[in-house]
Image (cartoon, grey):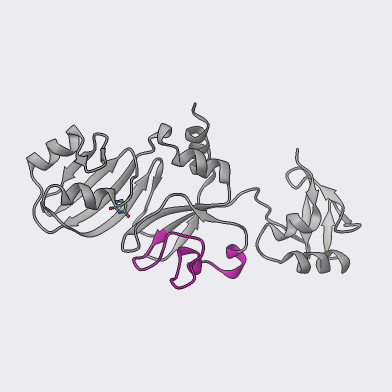
Amino acid sequence: MSYERLDKIIASTGRWSRREAKTLVREGRVLVDGAPAAGVEVKVDPEASEILVDNQDLGYRRYSYILLNKPAGLLSATEDNRQETVLDLLSPELRRIGLSPVGRLDKDTEGLLLLTNDGAMAHALLSPKRHVDKVYYAVLSAPADETDRAAFQNGIRLGDFTCLPAQLDITEEPTEVFVTLHEGKFHQIKRMFSSRGKTVLYLRRVAMGPLQLEASLGVGEFRYLSKQEVNKLNTIAQKK
Ligand code: URA
């Protein structure tokens, strides 16, 4: 059980600011367990109580989990003075509930990016201990071959570190590949291919742990994770 002030709970949905939430309560438009809320300072357990605004369920979620199909050209950050970030794709309401990207994709990389305001989950998923698999689709400047596959499997040595063994799957078109990483270092895929004399022309993340980027989610679109997906992430995050 966790009790919070009513205005804070209402504002946490991102649909109203704290000030607007206070007004809703004052105008008697908020019912808690069937009775008009007595005041904003009333503390309520939002998971145990029914909260209605204008007779509609508040739709309270303790945390939000969003899967974004990131387009190229945006930074994986929450704010930047000069450049657009992935948060610019969200509505003003969603922009004010404290979402952050879990990890980063390069500015020119597309694909699956998880956004959440569940800091503990984000921290756990990013921990090197958890080895959350990430799968990327890449288009290369030259065909990949068996020697590349073996090199990825053996762990490519990059100037400052040796990569964990990675899986390279070469498609029927050998300039198009899938790479599965168990870690996530800065520019890792580009650097791995560069060490093999190849340039990555296009990069898209297609999976991260149990999350898959489905073809129906267009570039720049996003969706909420399902309950099952959140449960799977929680299981990974809680592993010791
Ligand atoms: N590897 C890269 O080189 N770039 C990314 O954005 C992700 C993985």
Horizontal and vertical percent position of residue 129: 42, 32
Q: How many marks?
A: 0
Above or below, 28 against 225 in this view is below
Horizontal and vertical percent position of residue 107: 35, 63
**Which residue lies at the image location 10% right of the left edge and 48% below the top edge?**
144
Horizontal and vertical percent position of residue 88: 49, 69
Left or right side of 116 for 140: left
Magenta run includes residue 174: no
Above or below, 115 against 157 in this view is below
Left or right side of 36 for 63: left
**Which residue lies at the image location 71% right of the left edge and 60% below the top edge?**
11
- Front-most of 101 and 217? 101
Which span is picked out in magenta?
Answer: 69-95
Left or right side of 205 for 201: left
**Which residue lies at the image location 51% right of the left edge and 61% below the top edge?**
78
Horizontal and vertical percent position of residue 1: 75, 38
Magenta run includes residue 71: yes
- Front-most of 87 and 57? 87
